[in-house]
Amino acid sequence: MSTMEKQSKAIDLSHHLSDYVKSIELSPLKGLQKYFGRADMISFAGGMPSPAYFPFASVSADILDVDAFPLDNLREQASSPLAWLWRLFGTDKGTEHTTRVVVPKAPVAGDDGLNLATALQYGPATGIAKTQKFIHDFTARVHQPAYSDFATLVHAGNTDGWSRVVKALCNPGDTIITEDWTYPSAVANATPVGVNFLPVPMDGQGMRPDSLRKLLAEWDETKGRRPHLMYTVPVGQNPTGATMGKKRKQEIYDLCVEYDVIICEDDPYYFLQLGDYVSKPARASEPTFDPTHELAQWIVTLEPSYLRVDYQGRVIRLETFSKTVAPGTRLGWFTCNSRFAERLERIGETTTQSPCGLGQVLVMKLLETWSFDGYVRWLQGIRTQYKMRRDFFIDVLADEFDLQLGTHAQGIWAGAPVYTAYSKPTGGYFMREKSASKALFSFVPPSSGMFLWIRLHFDAHSAFVRGTDDAESLEMQFWTQLAEGGVLTAPGHFFAALKDAELPGVASEGHLRMAFSMSETADARRGLLIFAKTIREFFKV
Amino acid sequence: MSTMEKQSKAIDLSHHLSDYVKSIELSPLKGLQKYFGRADMISFAGGMPSPAYFPFASVSADILDVDAFPLDNLREQASSPLAWLWRLFGTDKGTEHTTRVVVPKAPVAGDDGLNLATALQYGPATGIAKTQKFIHDFTARVHQPAYSDFATLVHAGNTDGWSRVVKALCNPGDTIITEDWTYPSAVANATPVGVNFLPVPMDGQGMRPDSLRKLLAEWDETKGRRPHLMYTVPVGQNPTGATMGKKRKQEIYDLCVEYDVIICEDDPYYFLQLGDYVSKPARASEPTFDPTHELAQWIVTLEPSYLRVDYQGRVIRLETFSKTVAPGTRLGWFTCNSRFAERLERIGETTTQSPCGLGQVLVMKLLETWSFDGYVRWLQGIRTQYKMRRDFFIDVLADEFDLQLGTHAQGIWAGAPVYTAYSKPTGGYFMREKSASKALFSFVPPSSGMFLWIRLHFDAHSAFVRGTDDAESLEMQFWTQLAEGGVLTAPGHFFAALKDAELPGVASEGHLRMAFSMSETADARRGLLIFAKTIREFFKV
């Protein structure tokens, strides 16, 4: 990136703001702010209780060490695959090293509001100073936006963040660009506002630039305003698990400049970039993690955010602590141009106000204690754990099925390694022939995130009749049979950006999204064995 | 209340739902819920991280005792008016008694989700089970709704609550009924949706039923749909501090039944019902608080919520922990009919999801430790503290000005005790005559809440010219002079339901809202002395 780009400032994009957000008034007291900074001021202005009556004299937490999870797969696997379960349920307390952190009620000079008298009080929708500083510094350091005057603003998690983006940028009748398959809540959130979705075909890296250009260039203005907002999950795409590299992001971004589109990058899985799946036998000879590659080195290996190419300020990035600390923190942030941030703050003032103060102080105390380098080490540990879980999931499928590796020239997996599962040969020669002929399901090992997206080949099913639209029905039949067997998955049709879309090949296919993130090893194996048994029964192989 | 009323069920009021809220889809997984309850289920369905990776092994808090604040004014005042300040800033740690409470990560049977593995995970928008149970039990026991099948649902504070009510019930062009003077955020929140406000004249108890009937009966349907939603703060009315009794609530409610209006009762100050102001000399001979009147007895003396008369389920009550625990908890709840609750939950799912889990567990652990009776005792202590603060505020004004008690036959203070402040006689006989002739400001001691609403008599000001509309300008001139002197207040015009309304007498009056809740004694006195000095200078008396 050139120095010139780095020093660029956001351009004026305020013509994208919705009628709704343009009419939110400034917080009444904002006009009088020049008096607020004065230390000697006595305030009878706000409707505030006295902090003397906050019943919490202090809050504290026992926090894990930054290196609670190793960076070396093999070492962890050798020691005990159930260590985390024992830690969780307290039967192995001796091995879990924690540090006690305390947040007092009383303010201390220089604590940036990291005290209960401040954090439990009403505060600005921007959060306490400590939070403001952390999110801005972290964004500058990790994502390195391509323009200098970017703004950061807290929200109550990416779902809250996206709902504010829709409010801020969409009028009824507008159309939002998204991937063919996408996060259902993003659709459920925007549809009631009277907004439509325009799905763009994908390949192994996510949204396709050629398809996007065609859709934008051929947009029929008589059907409404050309789409001016994109919703995308570029890393650990939900549900497909695809990861979009910088080159692809640059292509999409350039198109968005050409057609004046705002990109909302929902990026909860950013630090869960897992890399390629290597089969179990091959992993045994992999080098263990090189500790000299820790910290900054690792950050550099991650595919960059859209912010890295955003020299105009047309990206709104949604970031969250949900997958790196915990979802229950309900804490995340926007990175965007300052004009958008100001409007998104106004929406915050008239809805949730500041994120929960108890959540803010505990998360910020954790991060302060860990330091930046420590948090990066923690993120690496988490990422390694999820990589192990992904690998374990696929290892079990490899044990249960005959997995054959191939590539697709087109479709959502174009360019990615596709595994197709056949029933494993059992019995004599004749049986092997018969079973091997049926491709039961296929998948691409997710390169990021938490999900395995499985395509079910219903054309191998005896009840399938080509040309009829019974795919969803077979999908739900299989889903139900699996649920009856004791395993819950997410049915594929939930993730279709358009419910009645004519996706190519959909009539012969069903899908399931299976999260490998949540289950401990024993449950994961048990669940996958049930899946294997159910699929063999369902396909009668 | 008759048994028949108690056993009544909510009527169908779903014709009030907005187009927006009717089109929010059910959470996709809802249809599959029958499998979720099974204990033996393995779930690959949700996009959930593993609780093993939540970095908090436990959180804990040092909480105050339920009797941290006495119920006896005189005793506290005799001991030390600065005790709370010392407690806050830690110089008097020895006297503050606290108890350590701990929330572990691991679930325990019967803990109702009061553990970090549950509370830090994604969860339903209804919150953890412990929160659900508390808010329902508390509502049933304290507010005793007049119908049996009421529902309760958490939100992230009353501002979030009201924003969801507007989304759920208002289409663009609708009109919301409110008081002449109201909470500015309630207006700022709804206006961008394209909603109008219809202010109803008030008296000393708040909204007037005769005025409401007239406005509803004479509604011009050509100007749009007749108002079907009311926003009201019936206790500690913001900004006037009025308290609405049960008889008045019954009258308003009956009108709302007649005209099919939904009442949104925003009631953050419910437990801060302070009673009448008694002058300092008279208070000295008041009986001290009778400890036998603690707990249930005290609850019975409070003016009841609208829920107590709501036999149809047309009240949406907004309740919050902001004034009873702390605003930074960002935790409160709706009480309403189950159909509305279901829609309000859907809005929650697509915005904030569940309130912050760290906030929920700490508040719920506090309340569990205190027990119901303990929490009521805490509320009484808080209420007594705010009563002392209100009394202290007015005592200082009584010291600084010549306060004369009277009543008004009409206007927002009709029926209430009105104090009018004259400059205190100083110097010789001639001077006393001159000063005594000017009524500088007047107020009604607030019977609930946190605010003193002051009317400034600009007709006594030399710059005032009758018939011109310079009242706001004089109001802001005075506000600014006060701010320059070091005291921040909230200017009256912020609270006008309609910014350009022709409120009777407004041309000769300005207003200020002064919170007595926030400042410790020394600051309150210092601020009020600056106020007194500034008003004397401003009015040249």
Image: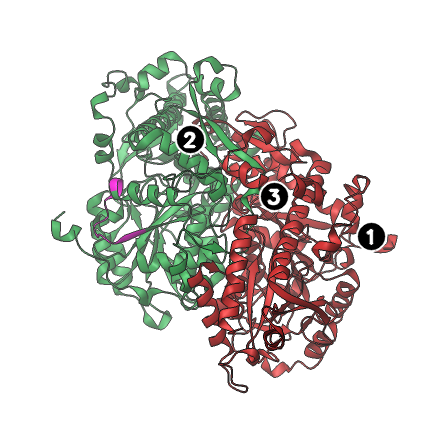
Chain colours: A green, B red
Secondary structure under the numbered disc 2 in the rendered image: loop
Between A48 and B212, the residue placed more toward the observer is: A48
- Circles 3 and 2 on the same subunit: no
Label 2, label 1: how many angstroms apart (C-alpha)?
50 Å
Q: In the displayed structure, does residue A7 sit left or right of residue A382?
A: left
Disc 1 or disc 3, which is closer to the eye? 3
Disc 1 from disc 3: Cα separation: 45 Å
Height in image: A274 above or below B149?
A: above
The percent position of residue A45, horizontal first and vertical second, equals 51, 58
Callout 2: chain = A
Q: Which of the numbered marks, if any, corresponds to residue B6?
A: 1
Q: Is residue A500 visible?
A: no
Asked whether B395 or B517 is in front, the reply is B395
With A530 as the anchor, is B72 left or right in this view? right
Q: Is residue A387 visible?
A: yes
Mark 1 surroundings within 10 Å by alpha-carbon count, few (fewer than 14), some (14 through 19), many (20 or more): some
Disc 3 and disc 2: Cα gap in Å? 59 Å
Q: Are marks 3 and 2 in contact (CB under 8 Å)?
A: no
In this rendered view, identify the residue nearer to me: B316 or B362.
Answer: B362
Closer-to-camera residue (B205/B4): B205
Q: Position of residue B429 (x, y in %)?
A: 63, 74
In this rendering, position of residue B112 left or right of residue A403: right
The stretch in magenta equals A141-151
Q: Which residue is mark 2?
A: A516
Q: Quadrant of the C terminus of chain B?
A: bottom right
Quadrant position of the N terminus of chain B in the picture? bottom right
In magenta segment, residue A149: yes
Residue A145 among magenta residues: yes
